[in-house]
């Protein structure tokens, strides 16, 4: 794919609410990729309450914006609790984890 940005799973030339593009599933983390190439990825996630993505590191700087609900982010051992409209940058190669304090949705953009 190289550097070409290709949007997928999303309607073009339409006003969208990103939080409406991914649904909650009981006991699950759900993801929907909107962009994926060598330079950037953009993914929407929904977390049921108590569900998590365990500690891992990303190959690029990861920016998360909470679209709905409350999420807990642990980055390099430090904990951040974010609610709707709040954004956090998780630096490249720093271990991080994400957990649903309550059901929540987020947009993740990773720059490589």
Image (spheres, grey):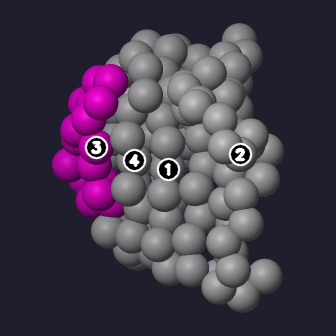
Q: Quadrant of residue 101?
A: top left
Name the disc covering residue 12, or none. Answer: 2
Disc number lying in front (4 or 2): 2
Answer whether labels 3 and 2 touch (C-beta < 8 Å): no
Left or right of 54 on screen, residue 88: left
- 71 sits left or right of 14 in the view: left
Q: Which segment is the magenta one?
A: 75-90
Residue 3, position as x, y percentages in the image: 65, 85
Quarter assignment of residue 66 = top left
Dominant SS in magenta:
strand
Q: CA distance from mark 1 to mark 2?
A: 19 Å
Tags 3 and 4 in contact by the CB under 8 Å rule? yes
* Disc 1 secondary structure class: strand
- The label shown at residue 108 is 1
Q: Which residue is mark 3?
A: 87
Q: Label 4 belongs to which residue?
A: 64
Mark 3 or 2, nearer chain start:
2
Q: At which x and y percent is residue 77?
A: 25, 53
């Amino acid at each position: 794919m190289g550097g070409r940005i290709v949007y997928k799973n999303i309607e073009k030339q339409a006003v969208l609410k990103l939080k409406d593009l991914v649904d909650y599933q009981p006991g699950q983390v759900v993801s929907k990729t909107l962009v994926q190439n060598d330079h950037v990825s953009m993914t929407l996630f929904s977390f049921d309450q108590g569900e998590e993505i365990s500690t891992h590191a990303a190959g690029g700087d990861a920016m998360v914006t909470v679209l709905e609900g409350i999420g807990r982010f642990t980055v390099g051992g430090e904990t951040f609790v974010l609610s709707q409209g709040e954004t956090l940058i998780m630096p490249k190669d720093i271990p991080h984890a994400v957990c649903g304090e309550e059901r929540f949705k987020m947009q993740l953009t990773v720059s490589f």
